[in-house]
Amino acid sequence: MGLNLFDTGLSIFADVTIPYHTFGSATTVHSIGVSGDVLIGGVLEVQGRAYFDGQLDIKGNILSTGTYFRMSDNREIKLGSGNDTSLLYQASDADAKILMGWVDESADSGNNVPAFVFGEKTPLVGVDLGLFDEVVQPHIVTIENSGKYAAVSNATSTGADVAVLTTATAGTFTNAVVGDTVRVTAGTNATVGWYFIDVATDQYNVTLDRNWCTGGAVSGGTIVCFHKLSMMTPKAIYLPIYDTAPADSDIDINMDGAMALEVTQANGRLYWRANNGWHYVDATAGLSMPASERVDPKGKEFKIGSEVKLIVDRINEDGSFHAMPYRR
């Protein structure tokens, strides 16, 4: 049985004047050096509660096998070497329990866009996504599993006032599909902005949804490309873009409430899933019906120039009504 000097109130260090005290064979690599400092060269085991009234600096990882890690109310978890990003559970609001995250705009006034990006690790960690350099509002972003699949600074156009984009980098557009997001950030005669791929021609060439040139042919165009990309900001919700009518095979869960934007129709369509089926509205006004209803309930087919009349066929529970077109 060993002698426990601390239980008796004795101190083996009371009259020692060496710079600091050492348990085991070790040499300090930090700034300890007064008689109250202690260096432990082996494992420290504490079976009761430990109090740290000053700053705790940890070089290695923190591994917890306990039930939870808890912070007191209204205490920040700081992230980043400049302490410019924080997470906080705020209990100051009497009407809500708020989990808050923010970027301190005073810490880095040139790069302070609050953005939460969710996706798979490999395409995101250590990668400049090229999404946020013109953004000023907070963004919540989800990115398809492959993340940013292309980023080049040698994009050119086939001429002035065209939508075709060409790159000298082999394989840039090998996996591109219609509806992919293309962001142009720089380039001689390039119109900076957001585009989508309208035609995926080959690994070097795509056609964008519109002209991306300003005055002359583009050279040195800097672009980034993504598959499905969705964002939510205080001012807008950006839906993933599809090149045909979305189907259940396009989404992970066949659940009502899904929404998507389809862009290859003349005016584009907004689709949503309800009652186990997909429905849409056109981007511009006018009567629009799916191809399955091109024949009216009496068997007459609608053609260009056909006159249409509407007959109410259903009164809904809330008093609204539905009408079907008939060919006159």
Image (spheres, rainbow, N blue to C red):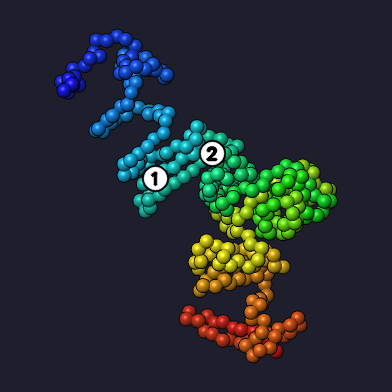
**Image spot of residue 145 (x, y percent):** 56, 51
Work out whether 270 lies above or below 287: above
Visible residue check, residue 37: no
In the rendered image, which quarter contains the N terminus? top left
Residue sitting nearer the eye, 101 or 59: 59
Along the polypeptide, which appears first: circle 1 or circle 2? 1
Q: Which mark is residue 226?
A: none
- Badge 2 marks a residue whose secondary structure is loop
Work out whether 145 lies above or below 287: above
For the residues carrying marks 1 and 2, which lies nearer the camera in this image? 1
Determine the image quadrant of residue 291: bottom right
| Residue at the image point whose x is 60% and y is 54% from the top | 229
**Image spot of residue 25 (x, y percent):** 34, 16
Residue to which mark 2 is pinned? 105
- Badge 1 marks a residue whose secondary structure is strand
- The amino acid on which the numbered mark 1 sits, given as a three-letter code, is Tyr
Please tell me how crowded label 2 is: few (under 14), some (14-19), or many (20+) other residues with Cα within 10 Å.
Answer: some
Please tell me how crowded label 1 is: few (under 14), some (14-19), or many (20+) other residues with Cα within 10 Å.
Answer: some
Residue to which mark 1 is pinned? 89
Determine the image quadrant of residue 292: bottom right
Determine the image quadrant of residue 202: bottom right
